[in-house]
Amino acid sequence: MNLRRALSIAPVHIGTALLTLIIGSAATLLWQRTHALSYCDVALNPQRYHGRIITVRARAIFGSTGIYLYEDCDPTAALVSLVELDGAPPAFQGPSYVEDVLVEGSHSEMKQAEAIITGRFDGKYSMGCWSPSFHIAAIRIELVSPLTDVPVNPSSESGLRTKH
């Protein structure tokens, strides 16, 4: 009799466990989306977030050599992060970053969008002089705005070309 009763309530327990898993996953995704850190908070406090998995919302710039996060957080430093998919081979090449993001030229192939990125933050990636200061090994990238062209002369935007 006990075996028959146990078999009759097993689907209820399995269903409850499955429902709990689905609700937990949905709640986690919702929490990550609504509790993304400010990129400026992360970039201005790299030691606090170094080595941690973070979720950050920022302007992502898509160039021929990679994805870069940039917000105008500091009056003198660009505080750019290189974003690469976790486990992917390194895409960063110093001269290409300078040409793609910082030097005058044609930028019609460059796109930008607001994005939410989750990944491991490296706050000690480089000194940041003419290269990205930080790195994020992304495990999730979600665009939350449409892709648009990066202006041909972004120097009109506060600080993009005047900082390094």
Image (cartoon, helix red, strand yellow):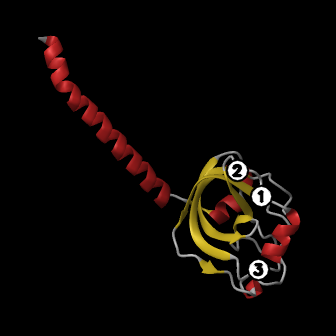
Foreground: disc 1 or disc 3 = 1
* Disc 1 element: loop
The residues bearing labels 2 and 1 have C-alpha atoms spaced at a distance of: 8 Å
- Which x, y percent locates residue 57? 58, 64
- Which x, y percent locates residue 24? 38, 44
Q: Residue at x 65, y 61 (%)?
A: 41
User: Which of the labelled discs sits on residue 88, or is there none?
Assistant: 2
Q: Is residue 150 left or right of residue 32?
A: right
Q: Residue at x 74, y 69 (%)?
A: 64
Query: Badge 1: how crowded within 10 Å, few (<14), some, or many (20+)?
Result: some
Task: Give the amino acid at mark 1.
Answer: Ala
The residues bearing labels 1 and 3 have C-alpha atoms spaced at a distance of: 25 Å
The C terminus - image quarter = bottom right
Can you identify the residue that label 3 sits on?
159
Q: Of marks 2 and 3, which one's residue comes earlier in the chain?
A: 2
Do we see residue 129 in this rendering? no
* Disc 3 element: loop
Task: Determine which quarter of the picture holds residue 1.
Answer: top left
Can you identify the residue that label 1 sits on?
91
- Which x, y percent locates residue 118? 58, 54
The residues bearing labels 2 and 3 have C-alpha atoms spaced at a distance of: 30 Å
Foreground: disc 2 or disc 3 = 2
